[in-house]
Amino acid sequence: MISTERSCVIGCYIAEDHFLEKQGIFRLLDLLALKEKNLCNIILGILVEFCGNPKTTLHINTWRGEKAQTAASLLIQLWRQEELELGVRRDQYGRVVDMKRPIASSFQRQQKVIPVPASCPSFAIMEISENMRAKLYSLFCKLGFENLPGLSAEDFVTLAIIRRYIDFKVGEVWSEIRAELKEEFRPIMSDEDALERISKISEDIGKAVNTVQTQLIESQLHQEIQEENQTYRKIQATRKQREMINKSWENFLTRTSNYEALKKAKKLQEKAIDASRPKVKTQTGTVHSTDIEGLHTTYGNFIDDLRVYVRGGTGGMGHPRLGGEGGRGGDVWFVAQERMTLRGIKEKYPHKRFVAGTGANSSVRALKGEKGKDREVHVPPGISLVTDDGKQIGELNAAGERFLAARGGLGGSLATNFLPCKGQKRIIHLDLKLIADVGLVGFPNAGKSSLLSKISHAKPEIASYPFTTVQPELGKIMYADYKQISVADLPGLIEGAHVNRGMGHKFLKHIERTKQLLLVVDISGFQLSLKTQFRTAFETILLLTKELELYKEELVTKPALLAVNKMDLPCAKDNLNELMSQLQNPQDFLHLLEEEMIPANTLEFKEVIPVSTYTGEGIEELKACIRKSIDEEAERENEEYRKKKLLLLQTSQEEKMNRR
C-alpha cells in the first residue's frame, strides 16, 4: 500500500499537496514511530523524496507523537537503534570512540583489505544503501540542524555525529583507497604524504566531534548539579520552617498547660457566644421554613493540602526466544468526584501511596502481555496538583475531570533487551482551593462568622475574641425561588498575609476560586493587640485591598461588595457617614496610611451595605444585593459567550463564501 502511494503521489505537486492537506505525512510518521524494521527504510525513502516539496518540512516539524515526541527526536532514536544493530562503537554517553573510523560498523571493521575493480563499489559505499543512516542524514539536511524542537542532551550528542556523517563517510572511502594501494603498490613519497594528510583531517574531525559531545555532556551535568543544589536549599528552608513551627507549638503547649485557666476561658467563651446571639422575635402569618435537614456541612478537622506518593505500574517481562513483548504497566489517575474530602482520602489510605498494577509477562499463549490495571484515586473538585518544588502540573475543577498522575512503564521488548521498564513515580501535593460564589474577606473579629450564620444555614464558631475561625467554612444562602448561592467564610487576615504571616497563603488561596468578594469591616475600626496600631474602617479597607493585591493582582479585579458591620454600636452612623465620604474620594485620604501600605488600585464596590448581625439590620438587603450582583455577573458572562459564538459563526460563514 505504501509503495502504491509512493508511485501515485510523488512527482505530482497537486497530488502531493492533497496528500499533505489530508495529513498524510503525519500518518507516515505514526507508522515510523512503530519502529518496524521492514517499514522504516521504505518510509524514510518516501519522506526524503517528499522533502522536494517545500511544505513537507513544516508538516514534519509540526508532528507530535506519544509523550509529545517530535519528528527530530524520533529520527535520532532511529539512528541510535540502527547504530546499535550495526555494532558501531560508542561509549556510555553516546560519544565517538574510534576517531579514525567514527561510523564504521562491526562488519566493516572485520573485513580484510580486498582490492576491487574501479567499477565495483567498496564496502563503505555499499554500506550507504544497506542501512537507514544515509536516509536519516538526508532528512536532517532538509530539516536543518539548528533550532530543532524537543531534543534532550543525549539527542544533541547523537546529532553532532549525524551532522558530520558525509565527512566521516568520505574519510572511510579514502581509508579504503589507502589500504588497497598499500596492499598492491608502494606509493611514492608525495602520494603517501597526501594520503596521510587526508587521514589526519578525517581523524581531526572525529576528535572535534568528540570535543563538542564532551562539552554538551558536561553542560548537562553542570545543570543537573545546579538543580540538585537548588532542591537541597529548598529542603533546608522547609526544615527550618518546620523547626520554627514545632518551637511555636511547644510554646503554645507551655502557655496552655494550666487546666484551671483553660476551664475559665471556656466558660467566658460560652457566655460571649450566648450574648452575641440575637433574641428570638415572634412572627405572625404563615412562614415557610427553609431549614432543610442535612443542608449544613461541617468541616471538622479541615484539610486543604495532602502530600501523596504515586507510581505507575512496572511493565511485564518480554519473551526473548519468541520475540514477545510484555504488557505495559498500569497508570495512576486522579479523578474529581463530588462529596470527596482530603480528610476522607487520608483516613482511607493512611500510607498515602498509590501504585498501579504490573503489566502481564509475555508467554507462549499470549506473546503480547496485557496492560496492568490502572489505579484511580477519587479527589474533591477544586484540586490543584503541585510537585514538591512548587510547580503546578494540573487542575481538577469539575466532577468527572481526570488527570494522568503517573504513567506505567513499558513492557520488555527487543529495544529494552526484553527487560521491563519501571513506571513513573512522583510526590504530588493535592492543594484544595474552595469553590464558592462569594468569599467573605476581612480582618479578625470583623463579624464574618456571625454574618455567615445570619445569611445562611452554616453554624460557624462565634466568639468575642479574634481568630475564632481557624478553618474555612461553607454556607448556602437559600432564596424563595430555591436559588442557592454558596458563601465561604475565610479565617481573618492580618497585615503581612501576602508574605504568609498568620498562615496568609493558606487562607488567601481560597479566595482565588470565588466569583465575587464580600469585604466585611468593623465600623468602629480594628486593632489586633495593644502592640499594633489602631486602624479605622477606611484604613482597614485599604489594607485588605493591599494584601489581596500583593498576593495576586487578579483578586482586586473581582466584583466586590462591602458590608459595614456592627451598626448597633454607639457613634456608628457618624462613622458610616465619614466612611462613605472617604470612599467617594479615596485619593484625598490616602495620606492616612504609610506609603508602602497604599494599594496601586482601590477596590470599586458595587454596593455598600450597613448591617448589624446583632439586631439583624440590613441582612435581607445584603442577601438581595448578593443575589443581584451574582445574577448580573452571570448575565454578563452569558452575553460574552453569545457574542463569541456569533463571531465564530460569522467567521465560518465568511470562510465558506470565500471558498466558493
Image: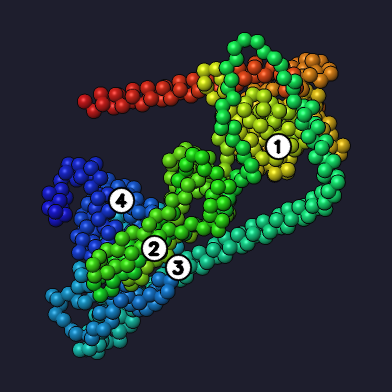
Q: Which residue is mark 1?
A: 469
> From this viewpoint, is residue 237 visible?
no
- Residue 626: quarter of image: top right
Residue 329, compared with residue 130, is above or below; it is above
Rendered residue at 70%/56% (across/down):
242
Disc 3 or 1, which lies upstream in sequence? 3
Q: Secondary structure at mark 3?
A: helix
Q: Secondary structure at mark 1?
A: loop
Q: Which residue is mark 4?
A: 60
**What numbered label is drawn on residue 358?**
2
Q: Which residue is mark 3?
A: 212
Label 2 neighbourhood size at 10 Å, few (<14), some (14-19), many (20+)?
many
Disc 1 or 2, which lies upstream in sequence? 2
Along the line of sight, the residue nearer the viewer: 466 or 147:
466
- Residue 155: quarter of image: bottom left
In the displayed structure image, the side of residue 9 where residue 189 appears, left or right: right
Disc 1 or 4, which lies upstream in sequence? 4
Across and down, in percent, residue 581 comes to 75, 16
Rendered residue at 83%/36% (across/down):
268
Label 1 neighbourhood size at 10 Å, few (<14), some (14-19), many (20+)?
some
Q: CA distance from mark 1 to mark 2?
A: 46 Å
2 or 3: mark nearer the eye? 2
Q: Secondary structure at mark 2?
A: loop
Residue 160, compared with residue 534, is above or below; it is below
Across and down, in percent, residue 55 comes to 27, 45
